[in-house]
Amino acid sequence: MAKVKVGVVGYGCIGQRLADGVAVQEDMELVGVVDAAPTLTVRALHERGMPYKLFCAIPDKRADIESAGIPVSGTMDDLLKEIDVVLDATPAGIGEKNKVAYIKHDKKAIFQAGERNEVADVFFHGYANYEKGIGQRFLKLTSCNTTGFVRAVDCVDRIVGVEKVVVTIVRRVADPGDTHRGLVDLLMVDPIPSHQARDLMLIMPHVKATGILVHTPVTHGHIITLVITPKKEISKEEALKAFNEHPRIRVVRIADGFNSNTSLFQYARFLLNPRGDMYEIAVFEETVGLSGKDIVFAINIPQESVTIPETIDGVRACMEMQTDRLEAVALTNKYLGMR
């Protein structure tokens, strides 16, 4: 079967990770990436020897990129003529503008969480609602936090059912490298329910959810606590067994040194993962417990890389590469080198 041809539009924080993720999928071909300027990620791509072809998003900006000594293979329109599906990783609002070009070229597209929900036909998660994305033209991913805790909620839901969830997110305030945010020496609270809790209910409409969001002056990762009310009782041991068996959940122990968001980031670097990326969320074993019937636990979200597997699942769904959910996610996991 011919490989599905993929293009990545927006070669920044998420786009570079999407490109690397697609490139290792043996049933997909990364045709190229698109950006509009000689950014640091584009300059690094050049210094790496241009493993991916670069296309210019704005024809008038092509000279700016080439003047930096970076070869350009064409325009975004040129790329769109060669591919089957677009992974749009541009800043919020740009993807919706790009959608005009995707429609013009009759291409399917998958957008990241920064876009409005209305940009897509389906709000998508690889494990929780894969079937809804099959054959659809436009999909939109959930945010990094929602992607991560939906994995955990879905994991419990498929064993004993979930009635409701309460989510507390301790959220990094900026991406590493951001200089335009000034939140220092304070914790800022948003009103309930957080958008992530509302988004969970869009993905899993049978689950009632609410949540609190706390912004913190850190840049690496988020810590989330979940209180899940199951439809049938579940023991701590049963929950840990389910988490341990989930390919995109890593159970870690505080006693072993995994006591913070930074410890997970550091560990990914020790594993020699590119950029310190980790695709799995981490469940802290010592936080798993029961409050009456409710199961309580805390997880770490690696915000820059966690949505990459689900985005690749989206390619499989919209292009109808696999119609079976578990077959699809298993292939994504295999090619990404996950358990």
Image: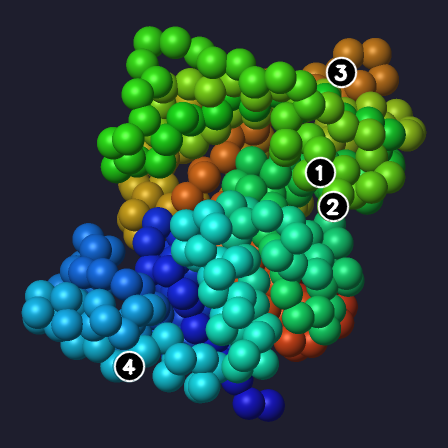
What element does badge 1 sit on?
helix
- Give the residue drawn at x 28%, y 81%: 74
- Residue 188 coordinates in the image, percent (x, y): 47, 14
- Residue 38 coordinates in the image, percent (x, y): 18, 60
- Give the residue drawn at x 33%, y 54%: 12
Image: 324 above or below 164: below
Task: Determine which residue is flagged by label 1.
Answer: 200
Task: Determine which residue is flagged by label 4.
Answer: 74
Mark 4 touching mark 3, by CB under 8 A?
A: no
Q: Which mark is residue 290?
A: 3
What element does badge 3 sit on?
strand
Report the amino acid beneath label 4.
Gly
Q: Earlier in the sequence, mark 1 or mark 4?
A: 4
Q: CA distance from mark 3 to mark 1?
A: 22 Å
> Viewed as shown, does residue 261 lie left or right of 330?
left
Q: Which mark is residue 252?
A: none
Image: 30 above or below 182: below
What element does badge 2 sit on?
helix
Report the amino acid beneath label 3.
Leu
Q: How many marks?
A: 4
